[in-house]
């Protein structure tokens, strides 16, 4: 099918973007890479009256690495971030997760900010943002605000970004030097959305005791989720019984969606497996870092 | 700032395969339909119109991308290369020969898109071939011939 008609605006500055959003609000959609929006428009599931094409906004194009964070502008293509993260193990979790986002041909155009603003609950970038933590930089005509990842996602395709606001950048929190990372996903074909996915960050101390765990799950609820109850594992070394017990609780607490292809129980089962695989990879990667750099 | 109402036509300038074109288009016109219907470049195929199948893959500023997921107007001032242009590239004869020898083409519907990915993704590993090919649906060949053709080209490049 072909998209319905719309008024097209191609602003050249951030101020122009914000003025247009202020004027048109909920009637407008931001067009960045278009890899999620345009399919919806082609199928007429989305029929925005106004399209604001931000591809000329130079100030949203940069990746800036700071001491505490990686700032990724709204227009940074997924492939560009994938290439950037490939050269530095600090951002390994991003690299692992990005390997599952669509295909190289869609990553060439699809943006990091666009995927996070779209907030598909089974997409990888929202899951990565929640798991790694950080802040979303949101602008409107009167100023800007920063919202932590944990408060950003509200529902399926719904975030705290209001119709008159613009997600200008994602600030990814820099993980600890000794953190280990894991990512695992079940999907029907490479590049498809996940049936269930999991991202994990594990930190251990010199004695190999767990000191910090972040385990995010995708595809199992209306937003990505962070697993709870991790603190009872802190201060203990690896214990398969304890960890399996915790993961069983995490899994049974899930209330995943059901569709004609995937029953809720099956999705819950896969989420548990993905969580276990991501968590154990993250632990192994943290363990290896201590073995390799015991003095760090 | 460029503004185009939904019922207006806007002037679009675009370089396609090294030629400069100027046409009046609606804002909702997709790049793939612009290439086929306005410019007559029917080598680019329309498949799923949702970015899955890869039949409409062209080069946008030298990078493979789906022409069904871009509005023509959004490509104003950009350089687009379709299979008609790629067939003039110096790398093309070797790709065509390898695909032919390995029976990588049957109905040919997916081929223009696949060639766009093959010709630009230089220096890929064998594993990356599969990742890139996953971005193209081929319902005839079972991919084996296409993959062998791509491997042949890489091997030739490395002088094996």
Image (cartoon, rainbow, N blue to C red):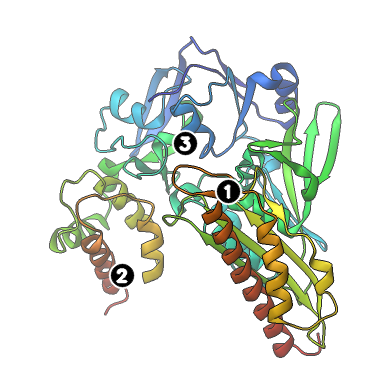
Tag 3 subunit: B
Tag 2 subunit: B
Could you tell me residue B23's position as x and y percent?
Answer: 38, 20
Is residue B89 found left or right of A236 in the rendered image? left
Residue under label 1, please give it: A122
**Residue at horizontal 28 percent and vertical 77 percent from the top:** B159
Residue under label 3, please give it: B78
Could you tell me residue B106's position as x and y percent?
Answer: 15, 51
| Location of residue A30 (image quadrant) | top right
**Residue at horizontal 52 percent and vertical 56 percent from the top:** A266
**Residue at horizontal 68 percent and vertical 35 percent from the top:** A158
Camera-nearest residue between A36 and A238: A238
Where, quadrant-wise, is the N terminus of chain B in this rendering?
top right
Camera-nearest residue between B79 and B150: B150
Residues indicated by labels 3 and 2 sit on the same polypeptide chain:
yes
Q: Are marks 1 and 2 in contact (CB under 8 Å)?
A: no
Residue under label 2, please give it: B154
Q: Are marks 3 and 2 in contact (CB under 8 Å)?
A: no
Could you tell me residue A112's position as x and y percent?
Answer: 62, 48
Is residue A177 found left or right of A192 in the rendered image? right
| Residue B56 visible in the displayed image | yes
Give how far apart the Cα atoms at labels 1 and 2 are: 35 Å
Point out the tag, 3 or 2, that comes first from the N-terminus: 3
Tag 1 subunit: A
**Residue at horizontal 31 percent and vertical 47 percent from the top:** B113
Give how far apart the Cα atoms at labels 3 and 2 are: 30 Å
Residues indicated by labels 1 and 2 sit on the same polypeptide chain:
no
């Amino acid at each position: 099918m072909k998209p319905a008609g719309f008024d097209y605006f191609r602003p050249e500055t951030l101020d122009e973007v914000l003025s247009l959003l202020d004027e048109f609000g909920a009637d407008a959609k931001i067009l960045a890479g278009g890899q999620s929006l345009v399919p919806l428009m082609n199928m007429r599931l989305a029929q925005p009256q106004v399209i604001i094409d931000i591809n000329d906004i130079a100030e949203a194009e940069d990746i800036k690495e700071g001491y505490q964070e990686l700032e990724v502008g709204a227009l940074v293509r997924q492939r560009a971030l994938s290439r950037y993260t490939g050269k530095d193990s600090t951002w390994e979790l991003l690299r692992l997760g990005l390997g599952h986002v669509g295909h190289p041909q869609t990553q060439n155009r699809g943006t990091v900010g666009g995927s996070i603003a779209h907030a598909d609950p089974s997409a990888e970038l929202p899951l990565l943002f929640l798991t790694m933590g950080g802040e979303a930089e949101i602008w409107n005509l009167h100023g800007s605000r920063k919202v932590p990842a944990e408060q950003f996602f509200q529902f399926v395709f719904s975030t705290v970004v209001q119709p008159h606001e613009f997600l200008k950048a994602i600030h990814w929190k820099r993980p600890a030097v000794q953190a280990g990372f894991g990512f695992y996903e079940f999907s029907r074909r490479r590049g498809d959305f996940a049936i269930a996915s999991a991202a994990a960050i594990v930190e251990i101390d010199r004695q190999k005791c767990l000191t910090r765990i972040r385990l995010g799950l995708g595809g199992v609820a209306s937003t990505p989720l962070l697993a709870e109850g991790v603190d009872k594992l802190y201060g203990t070394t690896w214990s398969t019984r304890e960890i399996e017990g915790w993961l069983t609780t995490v899994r049974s607490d899930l209330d995943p969606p059901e569709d004609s292809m995937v029953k809720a129980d099956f999705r819950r089962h896969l989420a548990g497996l993905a969580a276990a695989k991501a968590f154990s990879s993250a632990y192994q990667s943290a363990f290896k870092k201590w073995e390799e750099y015991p003095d760090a | 700032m460029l503004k185009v109402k939904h019922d207006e036509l806007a002037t679009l300038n675009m370089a396609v395969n090294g030629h400069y074109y100027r046409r009046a288009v609606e804002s909702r016109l997709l790049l793939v339909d612009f290439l086929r219907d306005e410019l007559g470049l029917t080598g680019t195929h329309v498949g799923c119109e949702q970015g899955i199948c890869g039949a409409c893959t062209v080069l946008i500023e030298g990078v493979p991308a789906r022409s069904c997921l871009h509005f023509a107007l959004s490509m104003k001032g950009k350089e687009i290369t379709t299979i008609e242009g790629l067939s003039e590239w110096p790398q093309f004869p070797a790709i065509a020969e390898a695909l032919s020898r390995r029976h990588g083409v049957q109905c040919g519907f997916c081929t223009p898109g696949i060639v766009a990915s093959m010709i630009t993704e230089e220096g890929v590993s064998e594993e990356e071939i599969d990742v890139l090919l996953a971005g193209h649906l081929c319902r005839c060949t079972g991919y084996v011939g296409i993959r062998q053709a791509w491997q042949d080209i890489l091997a030739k490049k490395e002088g094996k």
